Image: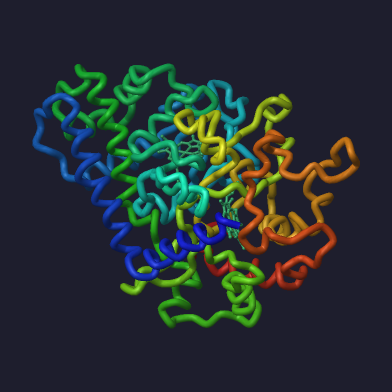
Amino acid sequence: MPRVALRHRIRIGIAVCAALLLSACGQRSESAHESAQSAAALQASTPTPAASPTPSALAALGKKIFFDPSLSASGRLSCASCHSPEHAYAAANARAVQLGGPKLDRQGARAVPSLRYVLNRTPVWSKVFISNQAERILEGDEPPVGGFGWDGRFNTLHEQAAFPLLAANEMANANADDVVAKLQRAAYADDIRQLFGAQIFDDRQSVYSKALIALERFELEDTSFHPYSSKYDDYLDGKAQLSEAERRGLMLFDDPQRGNCASCHIDRKGADGSHPLFTDYQFEALGVPRNAELRANRDPRYFDQGLCGPLRSDQVAEKQYCGMFKTPSLRNVATRGAFFHNGRFHTLEDALRFYVQRDTDPQRWYPRGADGRADKFDDLPLSLRGNVDVIDQPLTLHEGETPAWSDAEIADVAAFLRTLTDRDVHP
Ligand code: HEC
Ligand code: HEC
């Protein structure tokens, strides 16, 4: 079990980072956003006649852009339509994926992640190369980490923001110019001129890149993205007590033998007092069942394989990554209407039950194969199903064994996870 030893090392490494340095790690990635990326992107555009705008003025512009449905082909879809602030910047409905495109009839590819907490802490995408063959055999490959999107394909928020604006099944603009024409007609076009100079619309490319930077500034700066107002935050600060059920749930969530959830969804304070975000930003293949609600899945040859495509294109050759998706934060998870990258589950209890019964009762989750047995990990091509995690608890059990948690214990963990809901979020 070479991967065990190595993964253990990684998880410990990450845990140490979380325990000791999380805010420093976060600040490092935030300062990367602030200095290198935003500044470079701003300078890459043509000279700005007006004085350099302060970051907050940019963030205020970004907020208007974020909430503006006129920036879509349908005229009805803004960033906030899918990332609703009252729903922790996730979807307001329980659809597995959202509808977009010019007529709002095209499905997105994946469930909408919450934008709360993670954005200014997400490390840039990285994977460790083990060039030494002996070490590779001994230790196996480390899971990659970081980047935006379920597959980590964007390293900055301004690159990411271009995707929904131009995706044919989301805001569906034809190209950057199309977006700029809409910005020029927007109620806040004068804000853009005031910030960047009266002639700014003469340089279309510059307006476009500044709009993307403004969105990035809003997402990084606005305090609505990280209120830390959950009961669990109060508990960590000694201002609230967990109920008996919540406390039992927390213990199961932490228990390395029975839940082991906290090994990936980190739940401890950093040494500097920073509150945990319930993710280590690493990638893992959990074997979530195929979701028939996704029209794309009617084609039996279509598989969303996360890191190795089809949305991400630079890791296609890395077959050991196929099926891996980024570990999401579990903050506000109880308010989600769709769980996992393909939105396969619609209640928190089902998502938890899947973890503990995936292997003990596979018939419940997967369709029957030709041999009458459960077609396990059916959302991956046969040849890649070996990538699915069967070494981290509680994913190590076998058919017929007793699940790690009973129904009552699932209810306890769900009660604990409900303490991660911020005060202002719709339950
Ligand atoms: C039609 C629904 C929809 C719209 C509109 C939309 N998004 Fe998203 N957003 C998604 C989905 C789905 C994902 C996950 C994409 C993936 O993994 O490929 C996502 C992912 C993200 C992420 C990455 C989060 C992370 O932690 O990795 C950010 C940031 C984001 N969106 C910002 C925006 C911004 C800014 C806009 C407006 C310009 C926007 N979104 C518009 C559906 C939407
Ligand atoms: C080995 C790392 C790992 C462990 C251990 C782990 N998770 Fe996860 N978790 C992930 C990844 C990766 C995803 C996303 C997978 C996907 O969508 O395909 C995820 C997704 C989830 C989701 C869906 C969240 C959303 O926004 O859609 C929930 C709920 C969840 N995990 C709870 C748990 C619980 C409870 C445990 C303990 C039983 C646990 N996880 C253990 C890595 C892990």
Tell me where residue 283 appears, x and y as whole percent. Answer: 51, 48
- 385 up-or-down from 355: above or below: above
Residue 371 left/right relative to 260:
right
Residue 113 left/right relative to 27:
right
Q: Farthest right residue?
A: 372
Q: Which residue: 72% across, 43% down?
A: 377
- 28 up-or-down from 108: above or below: below
Tell me where residue 391 appears, x and y as whole percent. Answer: 63, 58
- 372 up-or-down from 402: above or below: above
Residue 22 placement: quadrant: bottom left
| Ligand 2 placement by image quarter | bottom right
Residue 199 placement: quadrant: top left
Q: Which residue: 44% across, 21% down?
A: 173
Q: Which residue: 50% across, 54% down?
A: 139
Scheme of image coloration: rainbow
**Viewer-nearest residue: 221 or 80:** 221
- 209 up-or-down from 226: above or below: above
> Looking at the figure, which quarter contains the C terminus?
bottom right
Evaluate whether residue 85 shows in this view.
no
> Looking at the figure, which quarter contains the N terminus?
bottom right
**Viewer-nearest residue: 218 or 182:** 218
Tell me where residue 298 appears, x and y as whole percent. Answer: 73, 27
Tell me where residue 128 appears, x and y as whole percent. Answer: 40, 47
**Viewer-nearest residue: 325 or 342:** 325
* Number of marks present in the image shown: 0
Q: Which residue: 64% across, 63% down?
A: 393
Residue 216 left/right relative to 14:
left
